Image (cartoon, grey):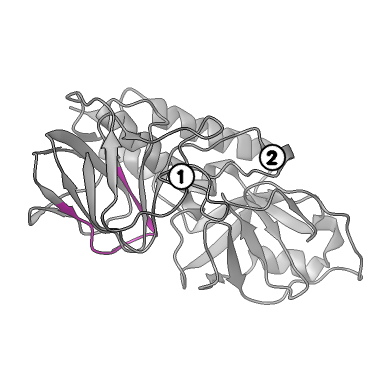
Amino acid sequence: MIMVEEPGLLTTVQDLGREGFGPLGISASGAADPVALRVGNRLLGNSPAAPALEATLAGGAWRFDADTWIALTGSDFGATLDGASVSTWSVHPVSAGQLLKMPSTRSGARCYLCVSGGIDVPLVLGSASTHVLSGLGGFEGRPLKKGDVLRTGPSRAPSARSLNATLAAALAPRRSLRVTPGLQSDWFAPASRAALIGQSWRVTEASDRMGLRLEGVSLHLRAPREMVTSGVAVGAIQVPPSGQPLIVFVEQQTTGGYPVIANVSAADLPSVGQLRPRDSIEFEVVSHESARTLLMEQESLIESNELLAA
């Protein structure tokens, strides 16, 4: 078991999400950076979707009651195990009674604490992921609190110890996000379409797992018009009447009534999960064919036999 001594700012149990329930109004949720989660599970020999702890901006403190192995992936939170530094993207043995501390981020937004055997919580609609807004899944449907006790699955000694540094660098989060044209992109004035990719955008403090609000020049339609509320996908860049775009994210509403100027490519969605308030990003338009190729290349890297080092 893992005892929560300090829960951090927002720590939840996450796996790869509950796909297929959008028509019922239930978004997939899941890890904000699924690449980090999958790589952590590969390091430990877990199933790719094994549940882990997702810490946001500030981690916490966790005490283990049995010997096991862990891997920290995603952002560097300055973790220590009984005072000794713990590196990210590597497997570390943990002894019964040891205390893992994850003070706060030194890089991106989220760190994943993956444990051999995964976090053992009941599945809801086939997933262990916490959907914070609806109180669905995870550990009692909520972020962790001091005093919570988490069970883990059966552990086994992993064969890998770290990542191939060259391949790992190719999976690192980006600040230049590749996007494809949105369904309503032609609704926008040419100057606004150009502005989307012609400047830097600042991530505002009004951002969370539901969506990231951006700050920059205002984007405008060619002419005033209304749209019928329709389904919306993770990564859609909507433009509300304020003209300031927002990126729909993993706990999104499954429908929306704002026009979509562009969509973040699937390969770059994990990078969105590592964005912090006040970070600056840029957009780069690619074709749908290029976006598919980028995703296939990313999948090949994650599944590559050369990704792990003994």
Relative side of 285 to 123, left or right: right
Question: Could you tell me residue 92's position as x and y percent?
Answer: 15, 39
User: Magenta stretch: residue 107 in it?
Assistant: yes
Q: Amino acid at mark 2?
A: Gly
Residue displayed at 88% across by 58% down: 227
User: Magenta stretch: residue 9 in it?
Assistant: no
Question: Could you tell me residue 36's position as x and y percent?
Answer: 38, 42
Q: Count of labels shown?
A: 2
Residue displayed at 78% across by 61% down: 258
Marking on residue 105: none
Task: Give the residues drawn in magenta, as a range.
Answer: 100-113
What residue is pinned by disc 1?
31
* Image quarter hosting the C terminus: top left
Question: Could you tell me residue 224's position as x and y percent?
Answer: 91, 71
Q: Quick check: can you spot residue 307? A: no
Q: Quick check: can you spot residue 98? A: yes
Q: Amino acid at mark 1?
A: Ala
From the image, state whether disc 2 or disc 1 is nearer to you: 2
Foreground pick, 144 / 105: 144
Question: Could you tell me residue 270's position as x and y percent?
Answer: 48, 47
Position of 19 relative to 113 (above/below): above
What residue is pinned by disc 2?
22
Q: Earlier in the sequence, mark 2 or mark 1?
A: 2
